[in-house]
Each structure stands twice: as structure tokens, then as C-alpha cells.
Amino acid sequence: MAAFSVAVAHFISAFLPMMAHKNYPQTFSENTSPSLFFEILTSPLISIFYNGHFAVLLFFVLSGYVLTFPYFTAEANILSLKRRLWGRYLRLNIPIACVIFLSFIVYQMGWYKNIPAAEISGSVIWFKNFFAEQLTLKMAVNESIYDSLVFGKHTFIPSLWTLKIEFIGSIYVLAFFIVKPKERIIIPMILVFAILFLVHKEDSIYFYALFLGSLLNLMKLNFRTRRLVFAIGFYLGAFQFECIAYDYLPEVLIWEKKAFYHTIGALFMALAIIKGFGEQFFQHKFIQFLGKISFSLYLIHFIILCSLSSALYLHFPQTQIMIALNFCLYVTFCLIASKIFELMVDKPAINLSHQFSSWLLGMVKKKESTKIISGSQSSLQRLTSLTS
């Protein structure tokens, strides 16, 4: 669901940029004469469903929860965490590398039409910026190997900035649970938070989201409490600027106001969902399907948005009906392409990362066993020489 929300948010930001003004007031211009229908669509109750920033924070929180789930359910299963740690690069970067080269091919073919589309839609600060510079094969190679995951460069796939946080943050989280004292969590985590604050400054809130997500494994909720927790999460997750419902909320330290309250909202909402709120809805086949292709959808939707959707936007009149039809085609092609990508790239990447981490840990274990045997033999020889 989070990836789908991001895909919808990007379509709106590209072709209906005024609808994104309250989420990004410095990036998108304001509608000075909005209709009642426009006001409803941009209200917090509706805009939360296409609020890409909140969706990203929800993804970070859930990622922290899922990554550390074995630790809390299998008597501190450190081996499982080690497997995830050593396989993390391949699991994330194989799909990233593939989608970067796909984007490079589309760019070389001249199929990206986002710049002229942005000039018409008015999304000149955001949508017009992508693929404006001369892109080279060397840039694609560098980003596919390390620039995207390590430094957050996102020249070919603009949404990749989040995966730097996901990659580095997941290493932080997994390493923390592997090395921390067995019965201690809170005090060591507070110390880590202080270090993260000093190192990452305003971006530290995103890393906190992963760590705090891991703590959801410890939480328990009854049925009535779940409703309240979800409501709080929904309210904070729907945060937007220039809205009387949120203007009273204070800024906290150096963090962006939106990032802070979206993080808190994501924690509350994720907790309610994990503990069973809306269980029937989230078990629906289509929602399960979206969850299965979520990473693929997150990676591939921007290519379709900047090529096919932008070309259709330019070719046909920019009426509400045509934009709605364009949106339907955009969603359809995104879902089909994501399913293909999931089968051909993402699933094999998961399998390969598991095989690599298991092989690596097996080699380490074998080496340690050899050292122990060699040490035992040496000790035995010394004892034999002493008694002979």
C-alpha cells in the first residue's frame, strides 16, 4: 500500500501539482480559487491516501519491524539477523541496478517527456528537474553499484533517495541487535539515537523510524486500544501545512515539522495494523498483491510516469477526463510492469541474497570450527608432551 500511495502522489505532483501544495508549499503553487471539490480532495482525510512522504515513513517503520521480527520470536535468533545483514546489499541493489539501467535505456531512446509535460502542468520546480542534465553510462554504473545505496544519488530513479536510508538504516538496526547486551534494549538504543543525531542531523528522524519500528515487536494492544492508536496515527499521518488542524503543533528540535509528525503517525498506524486493526481489509487479495509487488512498484513507477504518462499528457487535451484516463492507464501499466519485474528481478534477488548470506555464514562457521579443532589438537599435543 505504501508504494502504491507514493506512485499516486508522484502522478498528482506531476500533472495536478496544486493538489500537492499543502504537503510541499515551497515546491508547488497554491490554487488561489479552489472549488469545493478541490478542497475536499486536498483535505487531510483524503490527501493522506496520496501523501507519499507519510507512506515512506510507514515503510521505514514496517521495515524495522520486519527486519527484527526473528529476534523477538525465536529466542534472540542472532543467526537470522546475520543472514539478513550480509544479504542486504544484494537484496536491495540487484533490483536497483536493473531499474537504473532500464531508466538509462529509456533516456537514451529519448522516451522521457517529463520536461515538456512539466512546463504545461506547472510542476516546473519538481517534475521538470528530472533527466535535465546529460546522463552517461558511467553515471549509471556508479549509481547501480554504490552511489544510490551509499550516497543517496537518484539521477536515474528520483525515488531512490529513500533507499540510502533503508540500506544504511537496516545495517544500523541489524548490527545493533546483533551486538547489544542480551537483556538491554532501551538504554543502548538511546545512546545510538544520540550518535545518529550527531552524525545525520535532521535526517536522523528517518533512521529513528527504523529503530522504533523494531520496538513494535514488544508492544501489545487490545481491541479498543487499536482503534484509538490507529486514529492517532491517521491524524498525524495526514499532517499538512497551512491547515488549522495542524498549525498549533510545535516544531521539534532541528527536524522538519512534517517529518517528525509523520514519523509519530507512522509508528501509531503501523502498531495498530500489526496488532490486527483492519485485518480483513489487509488480507484482501488485491492488497496482498500490492504488498507482494511493493518494492518493484516503488522502483519502476517513475519510469512509466516520465515516459508513457508524460507522452499521453502531451498528446491529448489536458482536461479532467483525459487526466483521469491517463491515471487509469498509468496505474494499469505500473501494476503489470511491477509484477513482471517482481517475477524476473526482485524474487531472484531475494533468493540470491539468501544463498549468498547462508554461504558466507557457512564459510565463517567452517573457519571457526577449523580454528577450534586446530586449537584442541595443539592443546592435546602439549599435554601429551608434558606427560610423556
Image: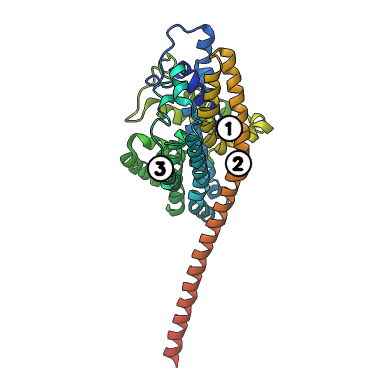
Q: CA distance from mark 1 to mark 3?
A: 40 Å
Mark 1 and mark 3 residues within 8 Å of each other at the beta carbon:
no
User: Circle 1 is placed at which residue position?
Assistant: 273
Residue occupying image coordinates x 50% and y 28%: 306
User: Circle 2 is placed at which residue position?
Assistant: 342
Amino acid type of disc 2? Answer: Glu
Q: CA distance from mark 1 to mark 2?
A: 25 Å
Q: Earlier in the sequence, mark 1 or mark 3?
A: 3
Q: CA distance from mark 3 to mark 2?
A: 25 Å
Q: Earlier in the sequence, mark 1 or mark 2?
A: 1
Residue occupying image coordinates x 57% and y 53%: 352
Other residues around mark 1 within 10 Å, as few (<14) / some (14–19) / many (≥20):
some
User: Circle 3 is placed at which residue position?
Assistant: 139
> Which part of the image, by quadrant, shows the C terminus?
bottom left
Other residues around mark 3 within 10 Å, as few (<14) / some (14–19) / many (≥20):
some
Q: Please state which of residues 196 and 39 is positioned toward the viewer in this rendering.
A: 39
Q: Secondary structure at mark 1?
A: helix
Q: In which image quadrant can residue 333 be found?
A: top right
Give the left or right position of residue 374, taking residue 328 as reference.
left
Q: Secondary structure at mark 2?
A: helix
- Coordinates of residue 287 in the picture (x, y in percent): 64, 32
Q: How many marks?
A: 3
Residue occupying image coordinates x 50% and y 70%: 369
